């Protein structure tokens, strides 16, 4: 186990070490202590290692992550897992705004609540939130899945493309062009896999409602030409 | 960007530490606002005296002899405690308005930062650590306080453009964000008799709240009204003699974290500002909801 104490080492030293793990290295288990809300903890890791962060982090933890499994034993500030490519990030506490923004792949699990703009412009990432999510979540979400065990705030899925949203609780309001959709067997199957991957037990996929794009904003409507 | 910190003590035994805790929180927000910094701190009030915090660009000249001149002018003994470019003057509460008026004649270049029974305000351009040092903020005691680190967007980097802004007795406000309808609101408030020291958008928000309270609203109602009348981005933290409030605009993109324990309520633009508070491991920590007024009172 490699331990980095952020009260003694700089953030640059931590991230430099994580960026220079050689193929086949035995240094596959990392632990970060005393993060105290530091920004950019374990950003840009590109190796199949585990990173356990003990405490709460600030902005952009695990951004651009590839292959690594990062666990935050605390809460995360804005932009956790922003543009992650693959691997997994688990946040044991809450996450602030735009968790998983623009994420292209991998799995982001938030065991507490996520704030506003969760999954904004997501492009392939899977996000599972055990609690609630805030307003404007999945805004312009392009692909991937957003699973919410609790409630969603205002304007869910505004201007959404082809991402799939599954909400178990109430949705305060839907954004433009986002509509409720039927759950088909393939969705149940997909959702069960995501719940399993996120370690969610005692919750059935049938308890969720699916939301997605009505696809009315995809093409310019010639009848609106006079408005421009 | 900008950084906000606030600490409202429930446990009286922490009062001697208020300045030290708040100073550390303020310095932790330096990279959110290295232009200038300020702090409003609410100390003990004996119910008989009020305090006026004044500021001067030439404190050696302006503060010399002021104690005696002011005492003679208003006919009661006042005391003056100078700290760098600022000074706190204590006057019998009944003479507060007379003292305020006397400055215009005795020291026309002196600016009044704030006044009230409990409030003291210190703000200057420069790094937060330097501002803390200059005013010996870490030694201050009190019941609650609010601090701000500024990265200017709407108006010049000057002492008067720094936060907190105080536009009413024992009232102060700090702001992270920018308002888009401040010019229009300023005109309306001027028509209603409010006066302004700067072109700053935050001063308009502070004056707006003071104006609503002068018309009979309590702080909570004034903040609710502000949600519909103030256009722009804002996370506000406000202080009154006994209270401490937080409100965010409906979009809520300016960050905010609240923490509460049996001993205190703390606000930070980021968790970093709260990370070293005593007992933070067991605090209830959450992000304030958009368009929701939070308020605590002693």
Image (cartoon, coloured by chain):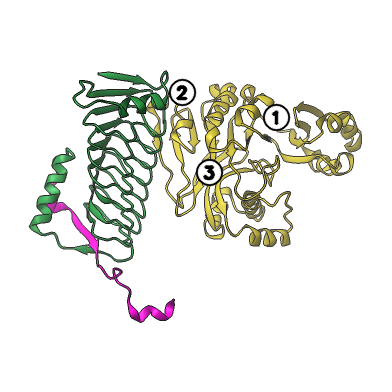
Chain colours: A green, B yellow
- Residue at 68% over, 31% down: B45
Residue closest to the eye, B200 or B250: B200
Q: Earlier in the sequence, mark 2 or mark 1?
A: 1
- Callout 3: SS: loop
Distance between the Cα atoms at labels 3 and 1?
A: 38 Å
Q: Nearer the viewer, residue A47 or A211?
A: A47
Specify the segment rendered in magenta. Answer: A203-228
User: How many numbered circles does the render carry?
Assistant: 3
The kind of secondary structure element at disc 2 is: loop
Q: Quadrant of the N terminus of chain A?
A: top left
The verdict on a common chain for dots 3 and 2 is: yes
- B202 vs B284, nearest the viewer: B202
Whether tag 2 and tag 1 are in contact, CB under 8 A, the answer is no
Task: Tell which residue pokes out farthest to the left in this image.
Answer: A185
Comparing labels 2 and 1, the label whose residue is closer to the camera: 2
Q: Is residue B57 magenta?
A: no
**CA gap, disc 2 and disc 1:** 29 Å
Q: Assess disc 2: are there few (<14), some (14-19) or many (≥20) residues with their C-alpha within 10 Å of its C-alpha.
A: few
The residue wearing badge 1 is B46
Q: Is residue B77 visible?
A: no
The answer to whether residue A209 of the structure is visible from this angle is yes
Residue that mark 2 sits on = B278
Task: Decide: is B90 above or below B194.
Answer: above
- Image marks 3 and 1: residues in contact by CB distance under 8 Å: no
- Residue B198 in the image, given as x and y percentages of width and height: 71, 49
In the rendered structure, the answer to whether residue B257 lies left or right of residue B189 reads: left
Which mark is drawn over residue B1? 3
Check disc 1 and report its element: helix, strand or loop.
loop
Q: Nearer the viewer, mark 3 or mark 1?
A: 3
Q: Quadrant of residue B94?
A: top right
């Amino acid at each position: 186990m490699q331990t980095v104490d952020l009260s003694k080492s700089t953030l640059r030293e931590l991230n430099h070490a994580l960026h220079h793990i050689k193929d086949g290295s035995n240094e596959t288990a990392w632990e970060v202590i005393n993060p105290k809300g530091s920004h950019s903890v374990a950003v840009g890791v590109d190796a199949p290692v585990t990173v356990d962060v003990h405490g709460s982090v600030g902005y952009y933890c695990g951004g651009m992550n590839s292959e690594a499994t990062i666990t935050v034993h605390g809460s995360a500030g804005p932009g956790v897992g922003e543009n992650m490519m693959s691997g997994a990030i688990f946040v044991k506490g809450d996450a602030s705004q735009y968790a998983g923004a623009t994420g292209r792949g991998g799995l982001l699990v938030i065991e507490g609540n996520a704030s506003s703009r969760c999954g904004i412009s997501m492009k392939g990432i899977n996000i599972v939130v055990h609690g609630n999510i805030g307003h404007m979540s999945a805004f312009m979400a392009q692909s991937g899945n957003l699973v919410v065990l609790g409630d969603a705030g205002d304007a869910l899925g505004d201007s959404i493309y082809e991402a799939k949203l599954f909400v178990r609780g109430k949705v305060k309001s839907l954004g433009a062009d986002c509509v409720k959709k039927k759950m088909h067997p393939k969705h149940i199957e997909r959702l069960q896999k995501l719940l399993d991957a996120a370690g969610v037990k005692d919750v059935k996929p049938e308890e969720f409602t699916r939301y997605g794009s009505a696809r009315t904003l995809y093409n310019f409507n010639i009848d609106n030409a006079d408005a421009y | 960007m900008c950084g906000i910190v606030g600490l409202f003590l429930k446990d009286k035994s922490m009062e001697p530490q208020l300045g030290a805790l708040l100073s550390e929180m303020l310095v932790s927000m330096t990279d959110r606002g290295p232009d200038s910094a300020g702090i409003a701190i609410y100390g003990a009030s004996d119910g008989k005296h009020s305090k006026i915090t004044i500021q001067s660009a030439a404190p050696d000249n302006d503060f010399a002899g002021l104690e005696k001149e002011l005492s003679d002018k208003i006919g009661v003994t006042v005391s003056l405690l100078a700290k760098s470019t600022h000074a706190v003057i204590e006057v019998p509460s009944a003479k507060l308005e007379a003292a305020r008026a006397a400055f215009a004649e005795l020291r026309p270049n002196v600016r009044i930062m704030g006044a009230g029974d409990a409030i003291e305000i210190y703000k200057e351009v420069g790094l937060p650590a330097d501002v803390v040092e200059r005013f010996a903020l870490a030694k201050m005691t009190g019941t609650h306080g609010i601090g701000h680190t500024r990265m200017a967007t709407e108006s010049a980097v000057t002492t008067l453009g720094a936060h907190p802004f105080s536009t009413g007795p024992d009232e102060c406000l700090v702001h992270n964000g920018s308002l888009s309808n401040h010019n229009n609101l300023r005109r309306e408030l001027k028509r209603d008799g409010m006066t302004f020291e700067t072109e700053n958008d935050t001063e308009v928000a502070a004056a707006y709240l003071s104006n609503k309270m002068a018309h009979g609203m309590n702080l909570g109602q004034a903040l609710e009204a502000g949600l519909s009348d103030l256009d722009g981005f804002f996370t506000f933290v406000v202080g009154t003699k006994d209270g401490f409030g937080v409100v965010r605009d409906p979009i809520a993109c300016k960050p905010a974290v609240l923490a509460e324990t049996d001993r205190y309520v703390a606000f930070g633009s980021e968790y970093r500002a709260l990370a070293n508070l005593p007992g933070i491991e067991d605090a209830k920590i959450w992000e304030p909801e958009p368009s929701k007024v939070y308020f605590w009172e002693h």
